[in-house]
Image (spheres, helix red, strand yellow):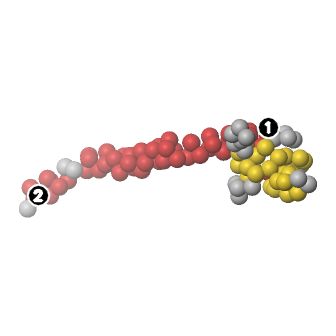
Amino acid sequence: MVDVAYAMAGGSGEAAGGGLMTILPLILMFVIFYVLLIRPQQKKAKEHRAFLENLKRGDKVVTSGGLYGEITGMTDQTITLEVADKIRVKVGRGYIAAFAPKESGK
């Protein structure tokens, strides 16, 4: 019976290294999430902020709701779009998604 107790006590040296081995997969998983999800999302958000800062009157844009129009007025928070002749709509600046695609030759 004494021999068994000594054999079990020999594993205490592995327990210290085992603590690191249990945390390593969590660290690795965080690194993978950062590289594949968080970093590209931050990059896209930075590009969209730069896009919104560079808008000017006369740009043709599309909103995230699918509304196409030309910018006729701007403030810090809102943008006025002309969606048809003399029909203007105010939209929050953050809801401008992209420049409108160029119309093919008509």
Disc 1 to disc 2, C-alpha distance: 75 Å
Q: Among all residues in the image, which is located at the extreme bottom? A: 1
- Tell whether 67 sits left or right of 73: left
Q: Check disc 2: other Cα within 10 Å, few if <14, some if 14-19, many if 20+.
A: few
Kindly identify which numbered label has been placed on residue 4. 2
Q: Relative to the observer, which residue lies in front, 41 or 101?
A: 101
> Which quadrant is home to the C terminus?
top right
Front disc: 1 or 2 = 1
Residue 13 in the image: x percent, y percent? Answer: 26, 46
Q: Position of residue 10 (x, y in %)?
A: 19, 49
Lateral position of residue 90 relative to residue 24, left or right: right
List the single residue furthest toward the front: 106
Disc 1 on helix, strand or loop?
loop
Q: Earlier in the sequence, mark 1 or mark 2?
A: 2
Q: Judging from the image, what secondary structure is the residue with disc 2 in?
A: helix
Residue 16 visible within the image: no
Q: Quadrant of residue 58?
A: top right
**Which residue is at a point 73% across and 49% down the rendered structure image?**
62
The answer to which quarter of the image holds residue 32 is top left
Percent coordinates x, y for residue 23 in the rendering:
39, 49
Q: Look at the image and tell me whether residue 5 can be seen.
A: yes
Question: How crowded is the residue under tag 1: few (<14 C-alpha within 10 Å), some, or many (20+)?
Answer: few
| Residue under the point 52% across and 47% down | 37
Task: Identify which residue is drawn at 8% across, 62% down.
Answer: 1
Q: Position of residue 105 (x, y in %)?
A: 71, 38
Above or below, 49 against 94 in this view is above
Q: Which mark is residue 84?
A: none
For the residue marked with disc 1, what is the amino acid?
Asn
Q: In the rendered structure, which amino acid carries the disc numbered 2?
A: Val
Q: Residue at x 25, y 50 (%)?
A: 12
Q: Which residue is mark 1?
A: 54
Q: Quadrant of residue 86?
A: bottom right
